[in-house]
Image: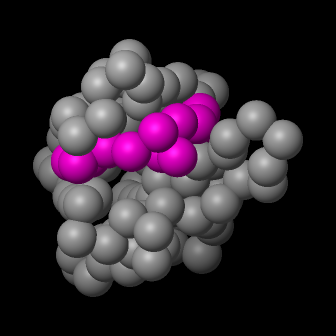
Amino acid sequence: QVQLVESGGGLVQPGGSLRLSCVVSGSIFSIDDMGWYRQAPGKQRELVAIISSGGSTNYADSVKGRFTISRDNAKNIVYLQMNSLKPEDTAVYYCNADLRFTRWNTRNYWGQGTQVTVSS
């Protein structure tokens, strides 16, 4: 059974840092795009950052220069380093990945989410 499991969330003061991790477990052939999304109370889920299997990245304008997405393809892990955190970064953060089971079969999966709260 395939699972995406996030960790690293928590409470941090404004200006602080957190690093989120997401491990993909289960039997898969490979992983295409991996990304992080977030959803604040009363708001729609939004893309934070995405990274391709080759390492190309894209970021939401609101996090550019503060957040860094990276991945370890050997360990099937994606990270989100979050620096200079602001109260408006408070949200549940979700890991997302396009998992390839065969050369022609891919499916999109979500993690369960991890809470990030930025508050003094």
- The coloring applied to the image is one colour
Residue 117 on image: x %, y %: 47, 25
All told, the count of numbered labels is 0
Magenta region includes residue 116: no
Give the magenta part as a residue range.
81-94
Residue 100 pos. (x, y %): 51, 61
Residue 57 placement (x, y as % from top left): 31, 77
Position of the C terminus, as image quadrant, is top left
* Residue 43 in the figure: left or right of residue 63: right
**Residue 106 seen anywhere in this rendered image of the structure:** yes
Q: Taking 71 as reference, is 89 left or right?
A: right
Residue 1 falls in which quadrant of the image?
top right
- Towards the viewer: 2 or 69: 69
**Residue 93 magenta:** yes
Residue 23 lies left or right of residue 104; in this view the side is: left
Q: Nearer the viewer, residue 96 or 17?
A: 17
Residue at (84, 41) in percent of width and height = 42
Q: Position of residue 91 (x, y in %)?
A: 58, 36
Residue appearing at x 27%, y 58% in the figure:
67
Residue that sits furthest to the front in the current view: 120
> At x 79% / y 54%, what residue is drawn?
44
Figure check: 26 above or below 76: above
Residue at (68% x, 41% y) in the render: 40
Q: Quadrant of residue 86?
A: top left
Q: Between 106 and 61, which is closer to the camera in this rendering? A: 61
51 shown above or below 107: below
Residue 5 in view: no
Q: Residue furthest right?
A: 42
